[in-house]
Amino acid sequence: MEILIVGAGNMARGIGLRLVRGGHRVRIAAREPDKAADLAAELGDSAAGEPLDSAAGAPVIVLATPYEGGKEVARLWSDQLAGKTVIDICNPVDFDTFDGLVTPPGKSAAEEIAEAAPDALVVKAFNTTFASRLANTGTLDVFVAGEDADAKKTVVGLCVDAELRPIDVGGLAHARALEAFQLLHMKVQDQIHGGWSTAITFAP
């Protein structure tokens, strides 16, 4: 499958590495084409870099951007994203204080993206995984929330291909809990000096 990753940062790298290892073709799109090209070169022959111009040709789009950037892309590409699986990975944390989220009360970043691109099939995933853990091998738990069953099935399949364990937590409203959960994860890993390399795992 061809997957378009918007962004060329650490999370784009981690997810891109997993997807390439899983046999998928990855396109990296960024406002700075040189960064997209550099990351694509690192990912190998199954990846290509490009400017942030179009979602054409990719059935799955990963918004590997900060909160505001994801919303902006969803607004700009609203028509292009219709019918496509759009994976929102962001955490709308107040990074000045780490004391709360910056989303409107009672709403998640994923729900805002769904409002900006109402015909897109928005799925929340990967927001509770840190980039350093994704870049390495080993199974991680990935929580998946969304309204469209087929879109979630697509994301679940990508996770399995990437040697990750997908856990379907229900509808997109549960993205609120996932974003709050990751805020707590960030605070705890800081207290225990986790170096942004901890992971949330459910074990029997």
Image (cartoon, rainbow, N blue to C red):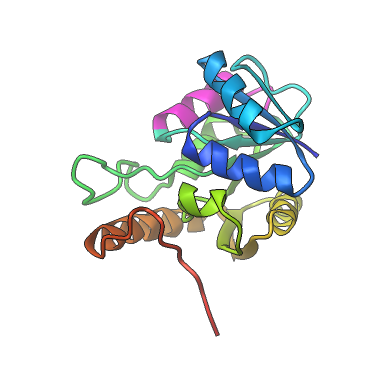
Q: Is residue 129 above or below residue 28?
A: below
99 displayed left or right of 167 = left
What residue appears at the point 55 percent right and 48 percent down from the top-left corner?
135
Counting labels gives 0
Q: Is residue 119 visible?
A: no
What residue appears at the point 79 percent right and 45 percent down from the top-left corner?
23
What residue appears at the point 72 percent right and 47 percent down from the top-left corner?
21
- Could you say which quadrant of the image residue 177 lies in? bottom left
Q: Is residue 177 above or below residue 111?
A: below
What residue appears at the point 53 percent right and 80 percent down from the top-left corner?
203
- How far from the left and from the top, in percent, is residue 28? 63, 27
- How far from the left and from the top, in percent, is residue 161? 75, 55
User: Is 160 contained in the magenta span?
Assistant: no
Q: Which residues are magenta?
A: 68-81
Q: Quadrant of the C terminus?
A: bottom right
Q: Which secondary structure class fits the magenta region best?
A: helix
